[in-house]
Amino acid sequence: MESSNWTYRQGTGYQSGMDLAGFEVEATDGRIGKVDKHDDETDARHILVDIGRWIFGRQALLPVGMILKVDPVDRVVYVDRSKDAIKNAPEYDRDRLDGTPDYYQQVSGYYFPGPL
């Protein structure tokens, strides 16, 4: 797992201990949903985004390395992917989150495919 994908970029405005749950998520082409959960405790820091407005009952796991900016006043998280990229991401699988590195690798490989 590429660790930089799961860590915050410098200059995003994220402050350690800030809870992003409830923040709107803004993709490069518009709003995609809200942060349902925010994990800042593990080596694979991520936000879980409820995109149910687009696909009923669907959630997407986004590595925090995708975050461009956090606006604590307006409660918005800006990410560097399109709505379609997020909608087409690997299916969120709650059962594979705990201690399953292949799941994180699958998600990371989708969002950060690396050199061709």
Image (cartoon, rainbow, N blue to C red):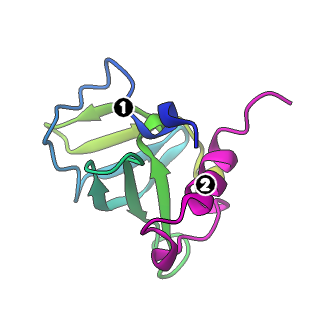
Q: Is residue 26 left or right of residue 54?
A: left
CA separation, marks 2 and 1?
16 Å
Question: Which residues fall within the magenta stretch?
Answer: 87-116
Residue at the (27%, 48%) spot, across then down: 40
The part of the image, by quadrant, that contains residue 35 is: bottom left
Q: Position of residue 72 (x, y in %)?
A: 16, 37
Farthest residue, direction right:
116
Q: Which mark is first along the chain, 1 or 2?
A: 1
In the displayed structure, 75 sits above or below 67; it is below
- Residue 90 included in the magenta stretch of the image: yes
Q: Position of residue 22 (x, y in %)?
A: 22, 59
Residue at the (34%, 60%) spot, across then down: 34
- As drawn, the label of residue 8 is 1
Amino acid type shown at disc 1: Tyr
Amino acid type shown at disc 2: Val
Q: Is residue 15 left or right of residue 5?
A: left
Quadrant into which the N terminus falls: top right
Q: Position of residue 27 (x, y in %)?
A: 49, 44
Residue at the (55%, 42%) spot, across then down: 29
- As drawn, the label of residue 107 is 2
Mark 2 crowd level (few <14, some 14–19, many ≥20, 10 Å Cα) = many
